Image: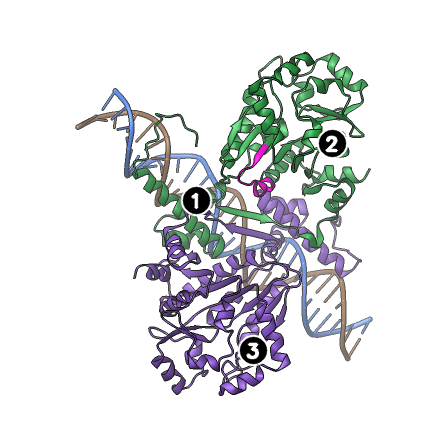
Chain colours: A purple, B green, C brown, D blue
Amino acid sequence: MTTTNGGPRRVPAEVEQTHGNRSRDALRAAQMYYLQDLTMDAIARELRTSRSTVSRLLSMARETGLVQIQVNNPSERAPALEQQISRRFGVEAHVVPVADSVSDSEVLDRVAIQAARTIGPLVDSNAIIGVAWGSTLSAVSHHLTRKQTHDSTIVQLNGAGNTQTTGITYASEILRRFGQAYGARVEQFPVPAFFDHAATKTAMWEERSVRRILDLQGRMTMAIFGVGSIGAGIPSHVYSGGYLDRADLDTLESEEVVGDVATMFFRADGSYSDILLNERSTGPDLDDLRRVRRRICVVSGESKINGLRGALAAGLATDLILDEGSARRLVHT
Amino acid sequence: MTTTNGGPRRVPAEVEQTHGNRSRDALRAAQMYYLQDLTMDAIARELRTSRSTVSRLLSMARETGLVQIQVNNPSERAPALEQQISRRFGVEAHVVPVADSVSDSEVLDRVAIQAARTIGPLVDSNAIIGVAWGSTLSAVSHHLTRKQTHDSTIVQLNGAGNTQTTGITYASEILRRFGQAYGARVEQFPVPAFFDHAATKTAMWEERSVRRILDLQGRMTMAIFGVGSIGAGIPSHVYSGGYLDRADLDTLESEEVVGDVATMFFRADGSYSDILLNERSTGPDLDDLRRVRRRICVVSGESKINGLRGALAAGLATDLILDEGSARRLVHT
DNA sequence: AATCGGATTGCACAAACGTGCACGGACGGC
DNA sequence: GCCGTCCGTGCACGTTTGTGCAATCCGATT
């Protein structure tokens, strides 16, 4: 029992204490609210505080991962869409329900929230998690729920520098959020997205600082990425953000590239071995990527469908999280 | 779903549909509410229904186990009480936070709710779960959350008949609820709680119908029980419900019995091997009980503390769920 | 065809909840 | 010691949610 009697809050002991009390209260409140179905009002009385404080304790408990809410659609009857996708493409599908009427940006946001909550339970201690960057991953990173792990590492999948901005704060912001959410070390990959000359890449790849990252990547237990798509709709970050020049884009087109994962490109049939630009890209070799045990692909918006098809054909993902509209287009054509 | 054949249950694809829609909607709603943080109002619009329906869909989703809410107090800093109990008694302790001011019956209720939710995640497919009876278990059985499993069995731990009532509806009601919650078969144990003569028990124990139950009990993967306590406070069901006569009670006292689990008695030091009444009791041999992998003991109210001490000394439980007041008394004396 | 009963819906109201705001104590720099 | 800053609190308000009730739907029975 650690309540002060009625009067003002004394606690001459340390900040430790105060903090401890707060988080202990959060746990108590969470148990009473979620496990015993008391109202916040009742909890407030037992905790000798105000209802608003209880409300805040509870949101803290949720945010810090003290409370975890899972939604199962267990084997019994996974919605038809997910089953079809699973069968046809050999991935575990998580379809995010979204009515057709909502705007693209809202779809992204909602896919991101659900992706973050789906990923959470999959993160283990001692994990090495590769994370790409891009608008999708950025959105996801904003909604991660905290989960304490030991000895986990977040490693950047591909360089982010480009000719106009360093792009690094953008990517590192994403990584930082992941690291913070899971209490993990963060390893950035301080190279441009693309080298101008393949030879430079070859040279850099021999540098020990780079090899350290490559080594980490080689030992990834999980990778999280979106897809870029060429063609219909809005071009993704990579195609419009100053990473590639006109000539590069033309080359891609003539090579029938449909999209990319972590700035490594592929065709509609899933082939990628002889695409020139990949020689200069800093993304992970896709053969290597495919050896990672858990590879989570997050996709929002139907404009990405072409890229997604290619990525699936290439077998890049084990898990696919996408909005309902895209899911439907994926199977119905 | 063990309905009598020829019942009103038709399922001409029509109901299938409707029912399917409803449960699919519940899943969608749950995802949108718990995974995407939409308000019920917004969900109602996307589902083209009213907000109240969404509210009901969500409570259905919770009740049927579609949504699972866990509260972790992970290794980090398990509350001091739980750690102390774990260390001193070698059980995993789950302390239910309850202010001192609330009434005994409310304590029981809240312990029961939290126990039910704690047990839920531990139930697996192919489980054989032994369940005792008594006021504690009855309370727990009222709050179980549904969880679909395959090939699980609920087996009654000890007979429930007595000289005045058959006591069977009471016990079977508890079992039925467990079975329903986990989609499990229910195996009753149709014998009295105590035989009048030990010899009758010996004879009955050779009957094949009884052996079938004993065999199941021998293969239990989990056992759930409360404790009875002799001495302070209100006597538990067993001691007041017409199961034992005056002579029995006197004998127990002279043998220094402090409590029971599933009508098998023990002393404060945990010994039980030479207690006469156990020869006539239909509860599981405590040596056998101790071989069960997971043995969950639910205790509410400080009057049970004596019995609980004995049960812990006898090593009957692997997991202990109890209210905060009892937990405190357990360690502080 | 008429009717019955159970299940499901939306409405309306009350209860429960989240959050901007202002207050007050604790801490640290000056 | 004094003041600015930060953090946690309770209050008040608007929003969100649960639920009793009556209306309605749908299949089943007579």
Among the two numbered marks 3 and 1 on one chain, the one whose residue lies closer to the N terminus = 1
* Residue at figure coordinates x 63%, y 65% from the top left: A184
A291 sits to left or right of B193: left
Which residue bears the numbered disc 2?
A: B311
Horizontal side of residue A279 vs A218, given as left or right: left
Picture coordinates of residue C2 (x, y %)? 21, 26
**Circles 1 and 2 in contact, beta carbons < 8 Å:** no
Q: CA distance from mark 1 to mark 2?
A: 40 Å
Q: Quadrant of the C terminus of chain A?
A: bottom left
Instruction: Give yes or no for contact between labels 2 and 3 (Cβ–Cβ under 8 Å).
Output: no
* Drawn side of residue C1 relative to residue A329, left or right: left
From the viewer's perspective, is the residue at label 1 or at label 2 nearer?
Answer: 1
Q: Give percent across and percent down for residue A234.
A: 37, 74
Q: Residue at x 51, y 57 (%)?
A: A118
Q: Chain of mark 1?
A: A
Which amino acid is tagged 1?
Glu
**In this rendering, is residue B137 above or below B274?**
below
Q: Which residue is mark 3?
A: A169
Please, is residue A221 above or below residue B51 in the view?
below
Q: Name the residue beneath numbered marker 1.
A: A76
Residue A36 located within the stretch drawn in magenta: no
* Residue type (three-letter) at the residue carrying disc 3: Thr
- Which portion, as a residue range, is magenta? B118-129
Residue B275 relative to residue A242: left or right = right
Residue type beneath disc 2 = Ala
